[in-house]
Every structure is written in structure tokens, then in C-alpha cells.
Image: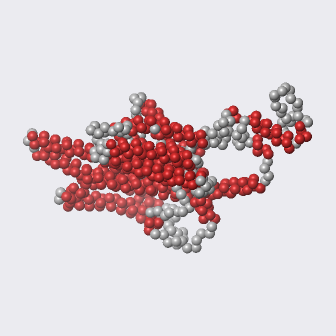
Amino acid sequence: MLPAEPWGWQTNVSCNSSIDMELVLHYSLIPSFAIIVVLSFLERRVRRSQADGKLCLLNGRFGIVVPLDFVGTFSNRWSFGFAFGATANKVMFLFSDSYLPLQVPQWAQAILLLIGGTEVGLAYFPFFACLSTEFRLVGSVLGFFYTCTWFLVTAIYVAQCPHGQMIGDYEKIIFYWPSLLCLVFLLGRFILMCVKALRVRLKRGVPSEVNYFLEVHQAQHVKRLLGKPPERQARKSWFQRKVYEWDPCFQFPGRMIGTFVLALICLYIFIVIEFYIYKQFSEGLNVLEQNFEELVDYSNGSEVHALVVLKLKEFINVSQGVWIFTTVAASLTCISYVFHILACYRKHMKRLWAGERQFLPQRSRDPSSSQSVAAIARYSGWQIAYLLWGYLILHVVQHLFGLMIMYSFVLPVQQGQGLELAKGLGLGILTIGIAIGLMMLQIKIAASFFLQPKLSPDDKQKPLALNNRKAFHNFNYFLFFYNVLLGLGACLFRLFYSVVLGTWLIARIDRTIMQKGYEAADMGFNTWIGMIFMDLYHTNPTLLSFCHILLAGTTEKKQQQPIKYYVFNNRAEARVSCRARTRWLLLYTLLNNPQLTALRKPKVQAGVSAAPQNSSD
């Protein structure tokens, strides 16, 4: 959540809040750490160490608490998404310079930001840990009280001082309402979890949320692959053909849903901040224009000064209108990117499931394992950062193009210069058309005079075999000098097209903006590739179905076989000390083999327990 002084602006001095959100963040680490300790105490470690034999009272407790399975969690996806949404204000706060509480050298700021990000992660850790823990009753109670505390503190902070210095009226309400909405959703979710856990504890219900090795939608996907394709395809609507088609056999993991929700909220906060920053900048330009106009009137300026004042006023009005229009355009573009990235994720995953890798660059078809593991941790944060930077750059470029269009076409028409504009535009279009026509003419001449006839009438094009070689060499010689001049325009067009396309797609991390052969230089695209390959190897429905069948068959065989006594030697199953386990094995062996009692080694001294003669028994 945003601090008491968001983004470096001071809050309204006439309103003093009794709550400092920065101190709340620092002190929230105490209950957060307590909740982590409680959940860790309830968790049991699968692998035991030698310390467990000495500390029998722990009984394997104090396991590692997992806040969220970033690889393949499909349960509570929207709950995790709203938990991420509750952290949106603090995520945006990390981008500001005011978050650096200490004066450190320039080279140490990255380390300080790492510490700050870790602090924010610990403060919101209970949200995710209480949602993912297997102990539903304890997790729901602790999560409800922790979420309720954050909600009450934030609501009181907003209610005491709803206004601010940067935006003015209802500043904090505008910034904090998405996080408050997410906290309300989490409160309802924890209440529902508590009710279900109580019904299970009172034996009035059955556990409904069970983490299966193979999810239902994954099994349905494999079943659809093994089944016969339908004879007639169902007719799709326009929305299914052009926009999106829902697939019941595919679900987005919790990581993608959380990134989706957090990206939308962060984009909303960023747009609001940018809008009011430009508003202040525009007000500054208006004040500058008024002061300049008063100075001209006071000094009895000439017509040139009056013309400058009119041009400045015209520029301010045009810039304000274009900025508002491009704000809407850039916002809708980036919002559509968020939805389109989800669609591209599903499309890429389905292609990888089918074994298709041709749509990826050659060097990206087999990423390293370490790159994939690091990419799964980087993706969500990088996607949000790319989206925010992409919106800002796209908005600025659109604003520049809007000003260029206004001064090139709209304003001349409004000022009665439409005829001259039409003449100039016509000459420009004619020049470009002639250049393009000459390029097309070269292709037509090459196809008609300098290629040999088709080998077969059914061929689509002529073979690449030269004809009329002497005329061809003369044709190349005389067009060489013209193509040099034509190449200048083609080069500028290539540069313009690259700038526009790169600016338009800079927020898209799912595709590279580098040319072929240089895809490895795009770190964002490499992160996307590593992430989808990580999901491919860990959430492939066919692979999971095969492993599920093997595990199910192994479990059935174990249930059919009699119990083997050597399982008592399994250290992973032991919950007692080594000495107690040895005595139990000795007692069990002597009870089933009484004749071994006479062969035992006699006691050396009183009070010392005897050991079996043959330790292998």
C-alpha cells in the first residue's frame, strides 16, 4: 500500500492522520513472523535429520511454509490473485525513490531495494501462507484476523485523511480502493474456509479442497486427446472466432491469475498518478502563459510577441486534448495486452504440449534448466514492470504522433489552409506511389523478360533460371544508381517502422522485438521462454497422466502385498529415537523367535541392556 507521503509528495498539512503506514509496515512483521512460526510448527518435514533423533518432542515439526506454488497450483487461483492485488500499492511504492529510508551509496541501492522488497514480502506472507496451508481451520482463523487488521488500519487511515496534496479531493480513496476491495474478498474467503473446516471437524461435511496429483481438467485434456474427434465441428460465434474461445480442459495457474490481477491494479494506479502529474504540468504551462501575456501587455510588446502568446496558448490547448485522447488509447492498449498475454500463454502451452516448437526462435527451443528455474521467479515482477514502462513509452510516443498529426493536418484545415494541405499531401502521395510503382515494375519486368518459362503449366511460378542475360545485365546497371536513392527512403521507412512496432510491443513480454538472430539479447522474451518451458515440464497433462497411472498401479500392488517388517528401518517414517527403535526391534524379534533368547550375549553389568548377538536379525 502507498505510504503516508506517496511518490515523494507531502500530504495535506491541514490533515494529520494518527496512522503512519510506513510504521504499520514495519510493525506488521511481528505478527507476520508469529503466524509463520505457528504454521511452520504445524508442518511436518518429510525428510528427517539426525537432530530429530535427539529432539523427540518436535516429532519432525517446524517444516518449511510454502506461500504459493508458482509452478503448478490450480486451486484458490482467484484467492491468490486478490492476495496479490492487496499488495499493489506497496508494489507501486517500491518504484519510488522515497522508499529508500537510509542514505546509502549509489552502488548499495540495489541491496537496499532487495531488503525493502523482502520486508514487503514478509509483511504480506500470511495472506498466501494461510490460503495454501493444509491446516484449514488454523490458517483461516489466523488469516482472517491478520487481514482484518490490515483492512481496519487502512480504512481508518483513509477515513481520517481522504484528501491529499497531489490529487486533492479523495486522493487516498482513489489510490486505496482496489486494495481495500481485495482485502474484503480475502476476508470472505477466510470466513468460507473456516466454515468448511468446522463442518469437516464436526463430521458434517467432507473435505472439498484436496490437492490431487492430476487435476480434473488435465485428465479431461488427455481423455479428449485419446478420444475420436467429432465428425462435425460446432459452429463458433464471432466472439469465439475473433476474440477468445473458452476451453474447459485448460486452466491458468495461480501465478498467471495473480499476475493478471496485480498488473491491472498497478496499471490503474500508474495511470492515475501520470494523469495528475500531467495535470500539474499543464497548470504550470497555463501559469507561464498568463505571466508571459501579462509581461507582453505591460511592456507594450509588438505583434511578434502577441503571436508568440497565441501560439503558446494554441500549443497548450492542443497538447492537453491530445494527451487526454492518447491516455485513453494507451490505457486500452495495455489493458488489452494483459488479456492477450493470457491468450498467448494458452496458445503457446498447447503447442508445446503437442510437441511443436517451430514457432519459437531456433536458439530458444531448448533453454537451459537454470534459466527456466530463474525465469519462473522473475516472470511476474518483470511482466508488471514491462507493462508499466510500456504504457509510459507508448503514451509519450502516441502523444508526439498526435501533436504531429494535429499540426500537420487538423490545424491547417481549421485555419483555412486545407487546399494547400491537399496539394502538398497529394504530391507526397504521388511521389511515394511512383517510387513504389517503380519497385513493382522491376518485379514485373523480371518476371516477364528475365525468367525462363514454366516447366509445367501447373507450376505456380517460373523457375529461378535467367533468360536474356545481356538485357538483364544492362537492366541492373542502369537501375543501380536509382536504387541507391530509393534505398535512402526505404532505410528511413525501415527505421520508422521499427520504432513504431518496437514502441507498440515493448509491453509484450511474450514476443521479442529483436530481429532474427538477436533474440537472446531480449531478456524479457528469454524470461517468457524459460517460464513456459518450466510449466511444460511440470504441468504437461500427458506426462502427469502417465505418472498418475504409474503411482496408482504401484499403490495397488503395495496394498495387495503383505506388510514387510523391514519398513521399520525407514528413517523417513521414524518418529522416535534410534535407541528406542533398536529396543523395539529386539523385543519384536525375540517374541517371534523365543529360541534366540538362549543365544543372547549375557549382561556385562547390571543396569545395561543387552543387545542381540546378530545385529542382522
- Whether residue 226 is visible here, answered yes or no, is yes
Colouring scheme, one of rainbow, by chain, secondary structure, one colour: secondary structure
Q: Nearer the viewer, residue 491 or 604?
A: 604
* Coordinates of residue 576 in the picture (x, y in percent): 71, 38
> Can you say which quadrant of the picture contains the N terminus?
top left
Give x and y (percent) for residue 56.
68, 36
The relative height of residue 67 versus residue 452 in the rendered view (above or below) is above
Residue depicted at 89% across the width and 37% down the height: 597
- Observer-nearest residue: 252 or 160? 160
Would you identify the image quadrant in which residue 200 lies?
bottom right
Q: Is residue 510 visible?
A: no
Q: Which residue occupies 63% across, 55% down?
A: 544
Quarter location, residue 591: top right
Q: Is residue 200 left or right of residue 272?
A: right
Above or below: residue 290 compared with residue 482: above
Residue closest to the far front: 202
Please name the residue shown 61% across and 55% down the image: 203
Residue under the image location 63 percent in, 67 percent down: 227
Indicate left or right for 371 with 21 as reference. right
Q: Position of residue 225 (x, y in %)?
A: 61, 64
User: Where, quadrant-wise, is the C terminus in this rendering?
Assistant: top right
Residue situated furthest bottom in the rendering: 232
Residue 313, given in percent of the width and then of the height, sits at 19, 48
In the displayed structure image, the side of residue 530 where residue 262 appears, left or right? left
Most extreme residue toward the left is: 300
Q: Nearer the viewer, residue 373 or 36?
A: 36
Figure label count = 0
